[in-house]
Image: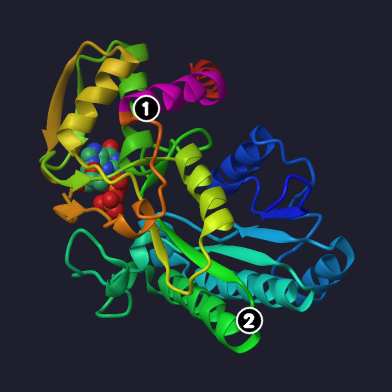
Amino acid sequence: MDQDSRIFVAGHRGLVGSAILRRLSEQGHTNLVFRTRAELDLTDQAAVRAFFDREKIDYVFLAAAKVGGILANDRMGADFIRENLLIQTNAIDAAWRAGVKKLLFLGSSCLYPKHAEQPLREEALLTGEMEPSNKPYAIAKIAGITMCQAYRRQYGFNAISAMPSNLYGPGDNFDPEGSHVLPGLIRRFHDAKMAGAPSVTLWGTGTPRREFLYVDDMADACLHLMRTYDDPEIVNVGPGTEIAIAELAQMIKRTVGYEGTLEHDLTKPDGHPRKVMEVSRLFATGWRPRVELEEGVRRTYEWFLEKVAPTLAATRQAAE
Ligand code: GDP
């Protein structure tokens, strides 16, 4: 990837896509192409082919996808499988036809079998039953990975796939019910601090262990893989460190500056006792994450204070 290569970031408004765009700009890339959904509908095959024919793209970061939490996945499986299959099939095929040099596709740690051994190794893919609630999403994404591998084998197309772990950072979803634990707790500690509430409730026992990768580190890993990795096998992208939920909660409490106590709601599920990725394949390429969890939480809270908190305060005032 040269400084003046023409680079298309699909999904540039999403959590990962926006971080990839930021990172590319920081590193001096200026020949960047991105389109909103209104400008280019990736589920429209003719439009996607016309776009690639016209734009003469060299590199593609395929970060566009329909994503959502457990509830959305459970209720809208048809949308998840259709949209993801269409987006990735159109983009991968049109990119190859138009002579794109290389494409990076993004999978997810939730594609691995439900009972796969921890830490999750790349070889575990397709070795067992997956979690039923996100099966339509997972099957679509696995089709995308397989498509990258098949286009490489049959057509010599340099398409690679990365599997991100739990990501967090600016642009995250802070909805108290629908979000993942890290942004969810930032929101709850913040709300409790503003309301002067005496305690904050943590779901479950706090003993499950998870890993969290700051989204700018994810973006950095994507650029690194685009520059250095040309193999058909998927690559896990994670921090290589893990933390218990209770410890994470203490860290977020400190960062937010909340002084009350912590309680546990044991009627809420703990979920998997441990969910982490084996990252030796990635680390063998020389890449390491840079943003420590505490620093990442601090930056995420700052972003929340700037972009999300003002709207929440306005809504609260309007309700009063
Ligand atoms: P998971 O990694 O797929 O289990 O997704 P989550 O990020 O939703 O949950 C991770 C762990 O954090 C689980 O053990 C939850 O019970 C626990 N947890 C504690 N408090 C919260 C919270 O406020 N929101 C969420 N989403 N999880 C929480």
Label 2 crowd (10 A; few <14 / some 14-19 / many >=20): few
Q: Residue 214 lies in magenta, yes or no?
A: no
Relative height, residue 171 to residue 281 (above, below): above
Which residue is rendered at x = 74% and y = 75% of the image?
94
Judged left or right of residue 291, residue 227 is right
Cα distance in 3D space between marks 1 and 2? 41 Å
Residue 237 seen in this snapshot: no
Viewer-closest of 197 and 119: 119
Query: Which quadrant does ligand 1 occupy?
Result: top left
Q: Which mark is residue 156?
A: 2
Farthest right residue in view = 54
* Region in magenta: 294-308
Q: Relative to the observer, which residue lies in front, 158 or 257? A: 158
Horizontal side of 42 relative to 121 (left or right) equals right
* First along the sequence among labels 1 and 2: 2
When the figure is inspected, residue 282 is found, relative to residue 231, above or below; the finding is above
Q: Is 165 situated left or right of 116 in this image?
A: right
User: In the rendering, at what x and y percent does residue 88 appear?
Assistant: 61, 71
Q: Name the residue under label 1.
A: 297
| Residue 274 visible in the shown view | yes
- Amino acid carrying label 2: it is Gly
The picture quadrant where one finds residue 241 is top left
Query: Horizontal and vertical percent for residue 104?
Result: 57, 62
Magenta region's main secondary structure?
A: helix
Whether residue 264 is situated above or below residue 60 in the rendered picture: above
Please indicate whether residue 264 sits to the left or right of residue 228 in the image. left
Q: Residue at x 42, y 46 (%)?
A: 287
Asked which secondary structure carries label 1, the reply is helix
Image depth: mark 1 or mark 2 in front: 2
Mark 1 is surrounded, within 10 Å at the Cα level, by few (under 14), some (14 to 19) or many (20 or more) other residues, namely many
Q: What element carries label 2?
A: loop
Name the spot of residue 105 as percent of width and height, x first. Answer: 55, 64
